[in-house]
Image (cartoon, rainbow, N blue to C red):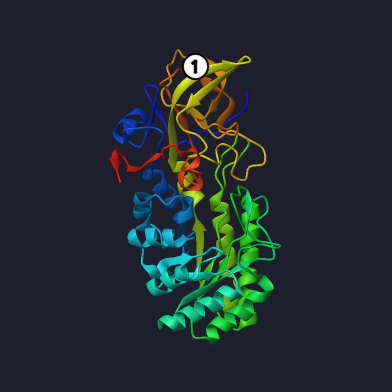
Amino acid sequence: MKPTGPIPPDFVRREGELMIGGRTAGEWTELAGDTPLFVYDFAIVRDRITRFRAAFPGVSLHYAVKANPHPPLVRAIVSLVDGLDVASAGEARIALEAGMDARHISFAGPGKRDRELEMAIDAGITLNLESAGEAERALAIGRGMGRTPRLAVRVNPDFELKGSGMKMGGGAKPFGIDADRVAEVVRRISDAGAIYRGLHIFAGSQALDAAAIIEAQRSTLALAARISSDSGVAPPHVNLGGGFGIRYFAPDAELDEKSVGNALASELARRPAVLADTEFTIELGRWLVGEAGVYLTRIVDRKISHGKTFLVVDGGLHHQLAASGNFGTVVKRNYPISLSKISNEASSCTVSVVGCLCTPIDRLGDQVELPDAQVGDMVVLFLAGAYGASASPQAFLAHPAAVELSIDGTEIL
């Protein structure tokens, strides 16, 4: 048997049945009409936003749409955050259609095509420039359109977020402009008459070590001050990145966001004069929505091979690539997993939960202990609210896309 991650405490059982919001898992699948099914509980997202506000007073909060772009969920989030960060024209359209003011949308990501730059400039979205070349293209497109672009500079910092699951800064990276070259780009776009919106400094993601995040934020503030002094232009806004992680695996410890907030408040209180009037933002995706989602998939076959039991489900890695261990994970470890309904008398056994795809890497639970399960029972995979459906190869082998529901209490958003 191999360990599984901890089930988030927001989920409880009533008479053995898993409750999601105000209904059982089975009731949601009946309403959806099919499995596999993602359900995102907005009440949990609301709680995370409340926790952020308490820990980081005076700091703006942006939602990173890439974590989960389900339109009803984004619409619900818009009213509770200060801005949205997008990484494509498609995400930008989702953000605008959700009701977010274009002035509070920022667009990052390398390789923006000219038509994406045009769309953002025309809408009034802030472009986070990834290179000096992108800066020149944005300026030229703005002149051609007769529009003044809103431009920020994404910085490739000269440090990384230690212990992060995915490092986004430090060393040679396709993201952002190297720190020692940013000042000249800031001067260039300011001298060209663009609306300079500041700096975006993102060092890494999925970090659970508060001390590492505190150190990265301290370094980020120092870097922002140095760039601003060198360029002679004070930034109206600095996006400090995010990187807050959640507990996927058995040994993980929960991030202490309060200690991070206290340390950041102290750093901001003594920030350099060049940053005195700067607005500071933290950009979060996974930490806001990851624990709010569950993935429900039904067992279609139970088989034994060479003495080992396999539960074959109607879902798989084409909906949950990360949970299968194929989205940046070096060693396959198990997400929290359970059955939707558990009888008090149920005995347990060690099984592997595998998907319906014809590939050996389609494995959602590797040698996990579950109550005795049969064909027709439903498996629940937790921590499915971030980088699930939209980050998985849903077209692989032409199986159907998963159904998605965003809910609040007993209602579908």
Determine if residue 147 is in view.
Answer: no
Examine the image and state in which quarter residue 136 appears: bottom right
Determine if residue 200 is in view.
Answer: yes
- To which residue does mark 1 refer? 372
Question: Is 48 left or right of 267, judged from the image as shown?
Answer: left
Residue 198: x %, y % from top left: 53, 74
* Picture layout, residue 106 above or below residue 29: below
Tell me which residue sits at (31%, 40%) in the image.
409
Examine the image and state in which quarter residue 295 appears: top left
Furthest residue to the front? 397
Tell me which residue sits at (50%, 75%) in the image.
151
Question: Is 236 left or right of 326, judged from the image as shown?
Answer: left
Image quadrant containing the N terminus: top right
Q: Nearer the viewer, residue 349 or 134?
A: 134
Residue 8: x %, y % from top left: 49, 37
Q: Nearer the viewer, residue 17 or 118?
A: 118
